Image (cartoon, rainbow, N blue to C red):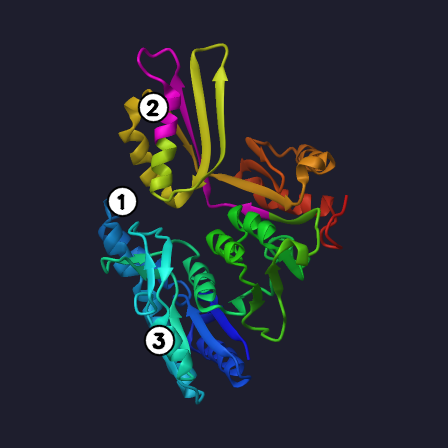
Amino acid sequence: MARLVQKFGGTSVADVSKIMKAAEIAVQAANEGHEVTTVISAMGHTTDHLVSLAEQIFPEVGRRSAREMDMLLATGEQVSIALMSMAIQSLGYQARSFTGAQAGIITESQHGVAKIQEIHSERLESSLARGEIAVVAGFQGVTENNELTTLGRGGSDTTAVALSAALGADRCDIYTDVRGVFTADPRIIPEARRLPSVSYEEMLELAATGAQVMNARSVELAMDNQVQVRVRSTFEPQDQGTLITHRVSSPEYTIAGIACDMNSCVITLKTPTNLEGVNPLEGVSALFTRLQELGIQTDMVMVLKHEDEPSQELAFTMEKVSLPRVQQLIEALALTLGNPLMQVETDIAKVSVVGRRLTSRPEVVAGVFETLSSANIPVQMVATGDMRISVLMPAKHGRDAVKLIHKRFNLAEGTFTA
């Protein structure tokens, strides 16, 4: 007998027939003798619908109460867990639903992007001991002061992995609408190759750079707690999908995959460097410290000084959803930053090649740039590291860049080996 956590995403519970399919998967595992906890997302596009309701009252994101948005968005999962529990019961098995608070998920107080601090799993343990399937709402938790919070985009993945660690689960199965982790998004490249397994580190880079299979924070949690994660299809449950595990247990790919992020934007701040009494770098430090406190992640940070004029440019990428808050923050820190001229680009794509020891494989970097150059695809920013190469470009070129790079390294036939 094993202890399993099964997470079903929005596409897996989009309607009642799909909820019944998810329930059948959970009941089958329970009938095989396993202890089963399920984590459920909101149905289909429920969250988008709830956001649209708020937009009708407050079109400007900055005017909406973060607390009330959490109260609103958390209702989506409450609908799903109730229906999932009923579906399991209709199949003759006992089930009990739990909101994040009822499941003992304690978070910090940052609304909208709260991080899980601890889990008091006693009620879930009691449910499992009674022979029930525990059905937990993903994406949400509660503070020590009983304030409801949400975990941000992909938060149900985080809930599932955190519960797996807290319950000592043998494995966490992430059920979704794809058959695992591929060398590229199958919607862009139908012939993309599925990976039988991938390391935590590679999956973390893929998730952080736009692969939509899992949330990056959940992969980090899995790595820190050595939780075995398997990504598999709700609609082909017999398929074993992709195992996310320790790097010594997974193949060593030179290139594991290519991700394309269309949800980022770039902010550029141009500041004069000859202002009396102003040190722009101190302002930059204050800005990034505050971004960290707010839980807003940035990427591809670049600082340039111009020799032909006394000015400095700071450019960084971040998620578009955080743009209004960051713009407000920059305006609040304007004096400290030296009253910079701010430019924002939202029509961009970030294409990332993820693998291992890329800094010691110059042929990979060369191949990426040769491919883009041959196709006349302009490059706006570049970031390189040991596990990824990220290139920023106009959004209209993103999908073509993925296709060309994927073909250049023959990833459809087998992962590239230098």
Looking at the rendering, in which quadrant would you find the N terminus?
A: bottom right
Is disc 2 surrounded by few (<14), some (14 to 19) or many (20+) residues within 10 Å?
many
Separation (CA) of disc 2 from disc 1:
25 Å
Mark sitting earlier along the chain (1/3): 1
Give the foreground label among 1 and 3: 3
Vertical relation: 79 (above or below) 229:
below
Left or right relative to 414: residue 316 = left
Which residue is drawn at the image coordinates 62% and 63% (left, top)? 242
Q: Position of residue 296 (x, y in %)?
A: 39, 42
Looking at the rendering, which quadrant does residue 239 occupy? bottom right
Mark sitting earlier along the chain (2/3): 3
Q: Amino acid at mark 3?
A: Ser
Q: Position of residue 182 (x, y in %)?
A: 63, 57
Label 1 belongs to which residue?
60
Which residue is drawn at the image coordinates 52% and 78% (left, top)? 25
Label 2 SS:
helix
Which residue is at the front of the view, 184 or 115? 115
Label 2 belongs to which residue?
337
Looking at the rendering, in which quadrant would you find the C terminus?
A: top right
Separation (CA) of disc 2 from disc 3:
49 Å
Q: Position of residue 262 (x, y in %)?
A: 50, 45
How many numbered marks, from 0 up?
A: 3
Judge whether residue 192 can be spotted in this image: no
Label 1 SS:
loop
- What segment carries the magenta color? 259-286
Residue 284: within the magenta?
yes
Q: Amino acid at mark 1?
A: Glu
Disc ID at residue 296: none
